[in-house]
Image: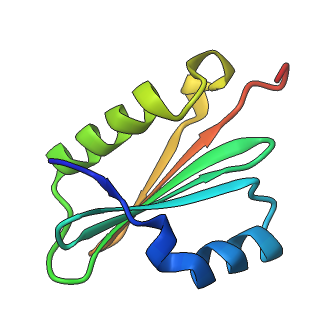
Amino acid sequence: MKLINTTNSHSQLVKSQLENTDATLVEVYSAGNTDVIFTQAPLHYEILISNKHRAIREKEIEKIQEFFLNRKIDKQAVDEANIKTLYSDKLIEISIPKNKSY
C-alpha cells in the first residue's frame, strides 16, 4: 500500500479543519479508493481512514497506523495505553493521545 499526499487537492477541507477544530496540522493522503486524513493537535493525533466502496481491512489499518507512527508522530509523546480505534462500516478513526508531559 502506497500513500500519496493529496493535501493540495483538499484545500477547503484542510482550511475548515484548521478553522473549526484544535488542529495545528491537517494532511490528506490517498491509497486508491482509501482516503486518510491525518490531524495533529496540541493534545492528540487523529487518523481517519475512509473507503466509500468497501469495508477497510485490518491489514490496511495496521499499515496506515505504522506509516504515521514511523513518519509523522513523535512516539515519545504518545500515550500508547490510551490509543482508541473506532470502527464503522467504511470509516475508521484512530485517536492517539499525547502524554500529559508534552
Q: Position of residue 58 (x, y in %)?
A: 19, 48
Q: Position of residue 45 (x, y in %)?
A: 62, 45
Q: Position of residue 63 (x, y in %)?
A: 24, 39
Residue at position x 45%, y 77% in the image: 9
Q: In which quarter of the image is residue 83?
A: top right
Which corner quadrant holds the C terminus? top right
Count of residue discs: 0
Q: In which quarter of the image is residue 11?
A: bottom right
Residue at position x 60%, y 33% in the image: 82
Report the front residue among 74 and 101. 74
Q: Position of residue 10 (x, y in %)?
A: 50, 78
- Locate residue 86 relative to residue 13 in the image: left or right: left
Residue at position x 40%, y 66% in the image: 6
- Height in image: 10 above or below 84? below
- Height in image: 52 above or below 41? below
- Locate residue 15 relative to residue 32 in the image: left or right: right
Report the front residue among 44 and 25. 25
Residue at position x 56%, y 20% in the image: 75
Report the front residue among 57 and 45. 45
